[in-house]
Image (cartoon, grey):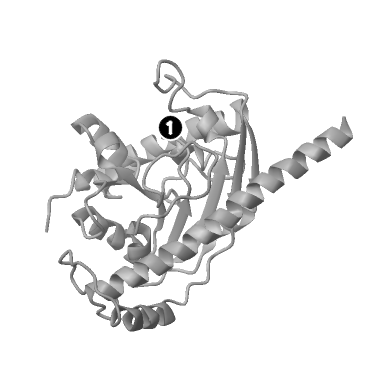
Amino acid sequence: MGRRIMEWAARSDYMGGIPRKMVITAVGGLAKVVVSLLNSTTVHNADTLLRLVRSRPNGVPLVTVSNHMSTMDDPFLWGFKGFPSTDANLARWVLAAEDICFKNSVFSYFFRLGKCIPITRGGGIYQEHMNEALERLSEGSWLHTFPEGKVYQEDAPIRRLKWGAASLIARAPVTPIVLPIVHTGFEQVMPEKFFRGKRPPFPLWNKRIKIIVGEPMELDLPEMRRMATSLSRNTSHSTRGWPSTCPGGLDEAAQKHLYSAISEKIQNVMERLRLFAKSFSKSKDQNLCKHK
């Protein structure tokens, strides 16, 4: 087993959970101010997200997947009115880039208290911290992921997704509920190139944020595993030395087919949500014009 960065600080019983509550309360409060007070935010289908965060079946994990518009998507995504953004028990776990959030001991301590799991970009789906993410799912926790893998601020179709989220969904001991989310506006709140090619020192205000929550995805994993096994017999793949640990004992070639198929389904749903967000925005603008 590889080394896990400051895993002790991520435990719920660390110092009675007080440091975690302090960080989640402070960060969640900031998200509330930015999203609910300083900017104009519209959320579609928020009730579905709230219901799954608060009262999904006991022991069933939740995996939310979203596009990645800014470095502040998380925690700002959870700052809209009515969301329990300051509740440390309900707060999500999130995969966070090691080179940004864990580049020194102070950052590592802070983000660990904030229920962040460090991921090395390019480190592969079997890196040690992915095992930690699986452990959180096995506990029935909520995990948020950005499967595009990096920030994209262009108004463009959803990019081809990395396989990390798909592998977690397929390898989880209990099949998680998968909920897609698409958002716009955070790229204006925290633009990558604000002044001299750098981000602003603080979030901007008077921007329009739209958060579109989809419906839980229906993934027939047993059938997808069967199809992946069948397809793998007829194709050749370069090998990376993956273990056959996926439920069903799939070999590496079959796993690649499976993760690709899951990722493609999620990408397609996210793209439909993105297009809906654009039409949703236009209809609201038209209604506003009618009432002026």
Q: Position of residue 153 (x, y in %)?
A: 48, 36
Q: Given the current orientation, which residue lies at the most extreme top position?
A: 196
Vertical placement of residue 138 versus 12, above or below: below
According to the picture, the residue beneath numbered tag 1 turns out to be 26
Residue at position x 22%, y 60% from top? 126
> Relative to residue 252, is residue 209 depicted above or below?
above
The one nearer the camera, 208 or 77, is 208
Query: Quadrant of the rendered structure where residue 110 is?
Result: top left
Q: Is any part of residue 54 visible from this angle? A: no
Residue farthest toward the right in the current orientation of the protein: 291
Between 163 and 12, the one nearer to me in the picture? 163
Task: Place residue 246 in its image quadrant.
Answer: bottom left
Residue at 30% across, 81% down:
234
Q: Secondary structure beneath disc 1?
A: helix
Count all numbered tags in the image, as a single digit.
1
Image quadrant in which the N terminus is located = bottom left
Quadrant occupied by the C terminus:
top right
Position of 55 compared to 233: left or right? right
Crowd rating for badge 1 (residues with CA inside 10 Å; few <14, some 14–19, many 20+): some
Q: What residue do we see at 29% from left, 71% from top?
A: 255
| Residue 132: image location, x then y, percent | 25, 57
Residue shown at 53% from the left, 43% from the top: 156
In the rendered structure, which amino acid carries the disc numbered 1? Ala
Asked which quadrant contains residue 114, the reply is top left
Residue 143 on image: x %, y %: 40, 55
Q: Position of residue 217 (x, y in %)?
A: 53, 66
Q: Is residue 224 visible?
A: yes
